Amino acid sequence: MSVDAWGFDVQRQVTARRLRSLRIRLSAIRMAVAAALTLVLVLGGAGALRDRVLALAFPPWAATVTFLVVLFGLVMAVDLPFRYVGGYRWERAFDLSPQRFSGWMKDLAKSLGLGLGLTVAAGMVLLWLLAAWPTWWWLIAWLLGLAVSVILAFIAPVVLVPMFYRLRPLDDPALRTRFESLAVRAKVPIVGVFELRASEKTRRSNAAVMGLGRTRRVVVTDTLLHDFRPEEVETVLAHELAHQKFLDPLRGFVLGSATSLVTLAVTGLLYSILYSLLGIRSIADMAGLPLLAALLGLVSLPLQPLELSWSRAREARADRFSLGLTQDAPNFASAMVKLHDQNLGVADPGPWEKWLFYSHPSGRERVELARTFRGLRT
């Protein structure tokens, strides 16, 4: 195996760049197709669909549900080929997933079911808010969105994630002892550590903090436990402890709440100006939902690089904390190399790629941080 100056597998990085280029092209085509569909819906397609649904003489609530179901079906029909290529075909072709097509279809059916349910519920509530509070609907929608996001974050580890992956408490006593010792040294209240059985569906490795309150836990994939040395896993766990110590989930929630408030306020203003100009009958007309969704996407777009920049700063701080807590720069660096090579992550992206897509420092930056580490805790 040939490695570069930072220790990354040269051939794996060539493959990672190839996959990245393919994904960028696919994403560009996907966005263009989605934009074309949105334009058709905004410029009369949604109105025609509304009229056809109303002609069925359903009760108002049934007509709205039917409209939302058909709208969801149209969007998914356009999007499914991209999901198949990017989410199944390339994952198999690049040896990133051992999952069979039947298993992928089963997961797809679950995600589509969840998506349909959320779409119908959100659409019904949104139309009700638009009719009841046409001026301040966006503020109430924001408050409701905060409540829903808290509930989803709380139930995710115990309801949503188990729908797709098996979770169990970490049963490796040595690794559990390492984690408990790390938590004591970090002065972070202990949270549960769970193993996620990812190897049935992916060869990637990862770790994350999930949940709120009693459901809060550190989750590590079985691929990470199997393919990484205990010392390397320890540096990853220390990184996750840093997020708890610095209250990063709470900070992320506050930042996300602020940006979503700005997004909804601007969207509400633009929608109140544009809906009548585009032939939408009233502010609460179901035919206006595609326009509203398009405005939400466009308004939020400029804020995404700022959110990613904040995320990179947060992750870099967690890296520094991990190095300071474990005092083990070599294993931290080797863990970062393995993560990028195994997951086919590009270790040295261009500045524009990092600015647009990366929520973490690049692999090369993380290895360089470890190499220049001087043992100072931050």
Image (cartoon, rainbow, N blue to C red):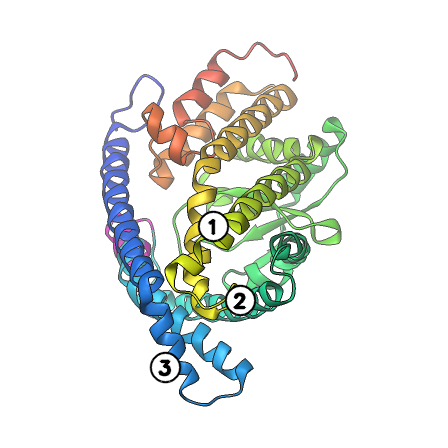
As rendered, which of 172 and 103 lies closer to the eye? Answer: 103
Q: Distance of mark 2 from mark 1, alpha carbons? A: 16 Å
The tag on residue 296 is 1
Please say if the residues under marks 1 and 3 sit with CB atoms less than 8 Å apart. Answer: no
Q: Quick one: quadrant of the N terminus? A: top left
Q: Position of residue 344 (x, y in %)?
A: 33, 39
Q: Is residue 262 left or right of residue 39?
A: right
Residue 90 falls within the magenta-colored stretch: yes
What's the residue type where badge 2 is placed? Ala
Residue 273 falls within the magenta-colored stretch: no
Sooner in the amino-acid sequence: mark 2 or mark 1:
2
Q: Position of residue 24 (x, y in %)?
A: 27, 42
Sooner in the amino-acid sequence: mark 1 or mark 3:
3
Tag 3: Cα neighbours inside 10 Å, few (<14), some, or many (≥20)? few
On the image, which quarter does residue 48 sit in?
Answer: bottom left
Q: Secondary structure at mark 1?
A: helix
Give the magenta part as a residue range: 87-96
Q: Distance of mark 1 from mark 3, alpha carbons? A: 26 Å
What's the residue type where badge 3 is placed? Arg
Tag 2: Cα neighbours inside 10 Å, few (<14), some, or many (≥20)? some
The tag on residue 284 is 2
Instruction: Work out whether residue 16 can be spotted.
Output: yes
Q: Position of residue 44 (x, y in %)?
A: 32, 66
